[in-house]
Image (cartoon, coloured by chain):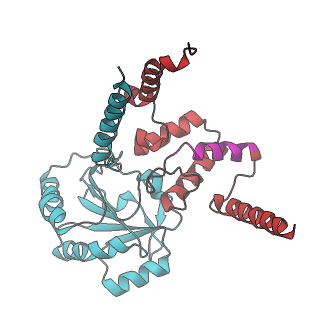
Chain colours: A cyan, B red
Amino acid sequence: MRFMPLLLLLVIAGMLAFSLSKKPPAPVDHNPMIGHPMTLTLLPMLGSEQQFSPQLWAGKVAVVNIFASWCEPCIAEHPLLMTIATSGKVPIFGIAWKDKPEAVTQWLAQRGNPYQAIGVDLHGQSTLQLALTGVPETFVIARDGTVAYHYNGPLTTDLVNTVILPLISHLQQENVKPR
Amino acid sequence: MSNRVSIAALLIAVCCSAAAFALPADDPLPDQAQEARARSLFYEIRCVVCAGESIADSPAGVATDMRREIRRQIAAGESDVSIKAFLTSRYGDGILMRPPLKSSTWLLWSAPIMILGLALLLARKCFRPRA
């Protein structure tokens, strides 16, 4: 009986060690829009009077990339987006998150522009709609407008080649049911 | 005597400056009651970017947007329940600082009480009057 406190300590220490050894819970990686159409407020389009909206990619398989000129990891994934864009496999649309039009224009002028069109979300109106936790994030949209895939973080060559491009090919072969 | 005064002045200055940094510069709601409701809700919502913090003090972009949206919904007449439901629909249950009591979280909630109960049971000798 006099060893009970020690035993209790060991049990609690064991439980703590077990919990601490586990990875912290993954940040939300199940975007609520998956399987549903992308909800997005109308945004001004960079360099145009037109408005940026999901209508831009209606009926097409598309990649929607959320980025910002002030975002370090966005610089890392940019060459991958350029490669995809120049391959012509799929149109890429961009949303500049909490960013100023002038800064975005300059950033793209320095690095190249992979985007068919860019929506400028100066105030973060899209944050909760898209359930963003930061930038960059990337969505793949199916022909019927539903979100087929979401990735939180900068794209990697591996991810693009083994997951995203195959998914896009698959989605492009799907027959579209007229809405 | 003047030493104590300067120390007191220094402490007061530090406390005041701490208060100035407490909340990020946001646009508060004009209605004080609504703003108070917003502030208390902020403490219940987890900042997704900064581990363990609520959105009340976080300067992160996502936290700022959440605070603005919560204020907007309060001003639009939404209840705390519906605002929290909206946030969990976007980000999952993990967005709440206090996870809801569900079958998956009963152990989380009851463990401290169970451990306390067990400890008291073992320590009951300490509560008997000494012979």
For residue B45, above or below residue A14 = below
- Residue A73, by quadrant, is bottom left
Please state the horizontal and vertical placement of residue B15, each as a whole percent of the image: 72, 60
**Residue A178 place in picture, x, y as percent:** 24, 46
Q: Which residue occupies the foreground of this view, A146 or B130?
A: B130
Q: Residue at x 55, y 18 (%)?
A: B127
The rendered magenta stretch, by its main secondary structure, is classed as: helix
Magenta region: which residues? Answer: B33-48
Residue B26 in sight here: no
Residue at 29% from the left image edge and 66% from the top image edge:
A154
Q: Position of residue A145 (x, y in %)?
A: 30, 51
- Count of numbered tags: 0
Residue reaching furthest to the bottom: A110
Quarter of the figure that contains the C terminus of chain A: top left
Q: Is residue B29 rendered to the left or right of residue B94? A: right
Q: Is residue A126 on the magenta stretch?
A: no
